[in-house]
Image (spheres, rainbow, N blue to C red):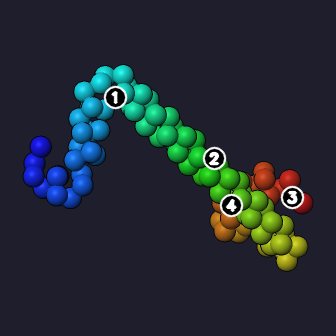
Amino acid sequence: MCCCFRSTGFGALCKSYKKFTANDQYIELYNTRIKAQRDEASRLDDALEKGLEQGRKETNLENAMVMLSKGFDAQDIRDITGLTIEEIDMLK
């Protein structure tokens, strides 16, 4: 062991690391845990994006209703909100 580990108190950490990395079961458990954490983060990211997309859609529908009440043309509403003409017609 390097002398810098003894003087800084990292000797026990170094010993634990060597024990951990020498055991295939520990490494497999570690990799499984990391994969599960990444999968959960991905699911959360997907759920967040879906929620944001739904919120944008609802906002566009609300804005389209206001524009219709102000006499905007369906083509203009489509151009501004990105809604389809069919979606706009359903609001009438």
Kindly report which numbered mark, 2 or 3, lies closer to the viewer in this rendering. Answer: 2
Q: With respect to residue 84, does 77 lie above or below? A: below
Residue at the disc numbered 1:
27
Q: Quadrant where the C terminus lies?
A: bottom right
Which of marks 1 and 3 precedes in the sequence? Answer: 1
Q: Looking at the image, is 83 positioned above or below residue 76?
A: above
Residue at the spot of label 3: 91
Q: Regarding mark 4 in the picture, which secondary structure is present there?
A: helix
Return the residue at label 2.
Answer: 47
Badge 4 vs badge 1, beta-carbon distance below 8 Å:
no
Q: CA distance from mark 3 to mark 1?
A: 57 Å
Report how far apart the C-alphas of labels 1 and 2 lie in the structure. Answer: 30 Å
Residue drawn where x is 62% and y is 52% of the image: 48
Res. 90 mark: none
85, 64: nearer the viewer = 64
At x 43%, y 37%, the residue is 34
In the rendered structure, which amino acid carries the disc numbered 1?
Ile
Earlier residue among tags 4 and 1: 1
User: Of discs 3 and 1, which sits in the foreground?
Assistant: 1
Q: Please, what secondary structure does the residue beneath circle 3 have?
A: helix
Whether the residues at callouts 1 and 2 have beta carbons within 8 Å, the answer is: no
Give the labeled residue for mark 4. Answer: 56
Location of residue 12 in the rendering, given as x and y in whole percent from the top left corner: 27, 45
In the image, what residue occupies the spot 78% across and 51% down?
A: 86
Q: Residues within 10 Å of mark 2 (few under 14, many from 20)?
A: few
- Of label 1 and label 2, which has the lower sequence position? 1
Counting residues from the N terminus, which is met first, the one under dot 2 or under dot 3? 2
Q: Nearer the viewer, residue 36 or 2?
A: 2
Which secondary structure lies at badge 1? helix
Q: Determine whether, in the image, residue 20 is placed left or right of residue 1.
A: right
In which quadrant of the rendered view does residue 65 lie? Answer: bottom right
